[in-house]
Image: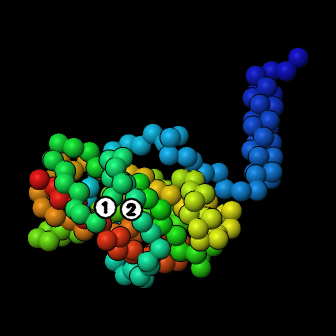
């Protein structure tokens, strides 16, 4: 009969074995569909270090899109929000020459009178449409992102939105051409 220590060791062995087998047989990145994501509300900060970036030296990138705000397709007209509303953004960002997904995605809010503000996005959301449109390998299917931003604490004004993608060796900024107005 096994004692408690031997039983714990056996359980730990099976857990580790399961993880090793899972890692061995999974050939594609695990990505999430937007309906599978339960996001926390991202707080806005004016310090890049609080969203895990320690430089503001970004390479330009033009392959990104903020497709919707609060479930509505973005248009060329600035989207208006009241201070008590939550800002939910959905989109995608790639840097196809990297052939890997970013380690993080940050939304930059560039106000006319305030310093830049930043909010973390959830990345790795499955986007077959982006993969197909750019003829990307399957490993880049998780190019989507989504975020919920608490705008209660930011000053009322117009903000241009940009998408920052962070990789191990470089960070890119993509000017989305999207604008919001906080009233």
* Mark 1 residue crowding within 10 angstroms, few (<14) / some (14–19) / many (20+): few
Locate the N terminus by quadrant. top right
Local secondary structure at mark 1: loop
Near-viewer residue (112 or 47) = 112
The x and y percentages for residue 171 are 45, 75
Local secondary structure at mark 2: strand
- The residue beneath circle 1 is 75
From this viewpoint, is residue 16 visible?
A: yes
Near-viewer residue (130 or 124) = 130
Q: Which mark is residue 96?
A: none
* Tag count: 2
User: What's the colour scheme?
Assistant: rainbow
**Residue visible at 19% across and 54% down?**
80
The x and y percentages for residue 28 are 71, 56
Residue 160 vs 3, above or below: the answer is below
Q: Which mark is residue 66?
A: 2
């Amino acid at each position: 009969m096994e004692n408690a220590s031997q039983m714990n060791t056996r359980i730990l062995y099976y857990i580790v074995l399961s993880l090793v087998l899972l890692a061995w047989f999974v050939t594609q990145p695990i990505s999430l569909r937007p309906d599978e994501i339960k996001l926390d509300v991202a707080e806005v900060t004016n310090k890049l270090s609080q969203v895990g970036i320690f430089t503001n030296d970004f390479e330009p990138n033009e392959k990104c899109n903020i497709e919707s705000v609060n479930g509505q397709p973005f248009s060329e007209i600035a989207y208006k929000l009241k201070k008590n509303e939550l800002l939910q953004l959905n989109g995608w960002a790639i840097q196809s020459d990297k052939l890997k997904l970013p380690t993080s995605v940050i939304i930059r809010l560039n106000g006319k009178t305030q310093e830049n503000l930043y909010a973390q996005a959830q990345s790795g959301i499955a986007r077959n449409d982006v993969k197909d449109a750019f003829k990307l390998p399957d490993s880049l299917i998780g190019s989507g992102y989504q975020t919920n931003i608490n705008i209660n604490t930011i000053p009322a004004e117009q903000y241009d939105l940009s998408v920052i993608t962070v990789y191990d060796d470089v960070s890119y900024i993509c000017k989305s051409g999207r604008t919001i107005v906080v009233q």
